[in-house]
Image (cartoon, rainbow, N blue to C red):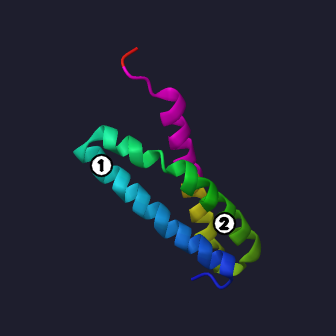
Amino acid sequence: MPRTNMGKISFAMLLILFIQIISIVTMLFVNGLGALTIILYAIVTAPLGILFGIVGITKESGSSVIVPWISTIISVTLLVLFFITLFGFSFGD
């Protein structure tokens, strides 16, 4: 468990990102276009996760630095998924 406030905020962002990933995977099985609407929220959550993750990495020490690293990695992955969806997805060309 992180000890500093930025580490705890990074942990909260990690929980939000996990909820977002679970909802994306769930919506992929229900409705593929519905998953796109959830992916579009990544433009808000991913930069915040990257910001709090990087600041948490600099503030934390020891084994509690794992949570900010995971938060940063998942945020970058969701941001890449957002940009792939935004620029690489075409409807019927």
Q: In what quadrant of the picture does the C terminus appear?
A: top left
**In 3D space, how far apart are the residues under numbered discs 1 and 2 (Cα atoms)?**
27 Å
The answer to whether residue 10 is left or right of residue 85 is right
Residue 92 magenta: no
Q: Nearer the viewer, residue 28 or 63?
A: 28
Amino acid type of the residue tagged 1 in the rendering: Met
Residue 90 location, x and y as percent?
A: 43, 23
Check disc 1 and report its element: helix, strand or loop. helix
Mark 1 residue crowding within 10 angstroms, few (<14) / some (14–19) / many (20+):
some
Q: Which residue is mark 2?
A: 52
- Tell me what residue is drawn at x 32 percent, y 43 percent: 34
- Tell me what residue is drawn at x 57 percent, y 63 percent: 71
- Tell me what residue is drawn at x 55 percent, y 37 percent: 83
- 22 up-or-down from 91: above or below: below
Provide the residue span drawn in magenta. 76-91
The answer to whether residue 27 is left or right of residue 80 is left
Toward the top, the furthest residue is 93
Toward the bottom, the furthest residue is 3
